[in-house]
Image (cartoon, rainbow, N blue to C red):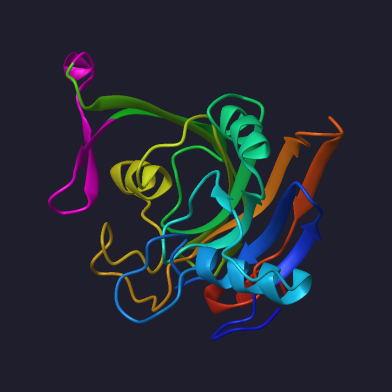
């Protein structure tokens, strides 16, 4: 499947479709004239099936527009309900590669913070635990492991989300003093042109067959090319 950017289809059947979202394309609800990933996948389904009307395509989880990586969409409401329930629990597992500017205190560990989202600026920030009972404050938790170093200040990390909060990875690592390369929102002094965050692993239970499915993809653009030769 091709569009303004290539959309790689990793798996497709009557229940769902798994693809690789290019960085720079919105998952859903794109503003302006650029088509979002949901629109492009609907066009793909129409071309493949000859369907005249607009196909059903349920979004199960999202990636921020600057973030590339693996996503799954549902092709009917029943599959959407099953996959959405997994995404809201431990049933769906997601891992990311990120390039950090500066090294964390530990080679591997867990980051646990309370985040508050500001809808006016489309940002989130870490707030003290004393505010955890406030309405819009949510617990954010992830685990990470450093994989390799490039030069004196860039570090490749693998991250597994325990929760799925707004800009979670970007905010938590910026708060820890090792912001993401290319993250102009939370790391304005960065030299990077492209946000170095990529969802490289996704696993879930198939809503119909109940088979455990897993998908992996290495990033192949931006600063990641220096780590994945």
Q: Nearer the viewer, residue 20 or 163?
A: 20
Q: Measuring 84% from the left and 30% from the top, which residue is drawn there?
A: 210
Q: Is residue 62 above or below residue 90?
A: below
Q: Is residue 25 above or below residue 88?
A: below
Q: Measuring 53% from the left and 75% from the top, which residue is drawn there?
A: 223
Identify the image quadrant of the C terminus. bottom right
In the rendered image, residue 219, in percent from the top left (x then y), is placed at: 65, 68
Whether residue 148 is visible, yes or no, is: no
Q: Nearer the viewer, residue 107 or 208?
A: 208
Image quadrant in which you'd find residue 116: top left
Image quadrant in which you'd find residue 81: top right
Q: Nearer the viewer, residue 28 or 105?
A: 28
Image quadrant in which you'd find residue 185: bottom left
In the rendered image, residue 173, in percent from the top left (x then y), is placed at: 38, 46
Query: In the shown orientation, is residue 31 left or right of residue 89?
Result: left
Q: Is residue 120 magenta?
A: yes
Whether residue 34 is visible, yes or no, is: yes
In the rendered image, residue 201, in percent from the top left (x then y), is placed at: 69, 49
**Which residues are drawn in magenta?**
115-133
Q: Is residue 128 above or below residue 146?
A: above
Q: Measuring 77% from the left and 51% from the top, which residue is drawn there?
A: 215
């Amino acid at each position: 499947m091709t569009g303004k950017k290539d959309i790689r289809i990793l798996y497709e059947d009557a229940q769902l479709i798994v693809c690789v979202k290019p960085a720079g394309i919105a998952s859903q609800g794109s503003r302006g004239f650029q088509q979002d990933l949901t629109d492009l996948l609907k066009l793909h389904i129409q071309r493949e099936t000859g369907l005249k009307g607009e196909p059903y395509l349920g979004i199960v989880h999202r990636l921020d527009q600057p973030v590339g990586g693996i996503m799954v969409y549902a092709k009917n409401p029943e599959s959407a309900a099953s996959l959405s329930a997994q995404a809201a629990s431990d049933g769906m597992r997601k891992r990311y590669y990120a390039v950090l500017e500066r090294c964390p205190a530990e080679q591997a560990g867990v980051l646990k913070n309370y985040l508050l989202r500001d809808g006016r600026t489309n940002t989130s920030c870490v707030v003290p635990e004393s505010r955890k009972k406030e309405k819009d404050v949510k617990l954010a938790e992830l685990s990470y492991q450093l994989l390799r170093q490039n030069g004196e200040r860039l570090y490749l990390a693998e991250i597994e989300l325990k929760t799925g909060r707004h800009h979670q990875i970007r905010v938590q690592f910026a708060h820890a003093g090792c912001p993401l390369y290319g993250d102009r929102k939370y790391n304005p002094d960065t030299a990077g042109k492209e946000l170095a965050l990529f969802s490289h692993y996704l696993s879930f239970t198939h809503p119909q067959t109940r088979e455990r499915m897993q998908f992996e993809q290495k990033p192949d653009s931006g600063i990641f090319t220096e780590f994945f030769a």
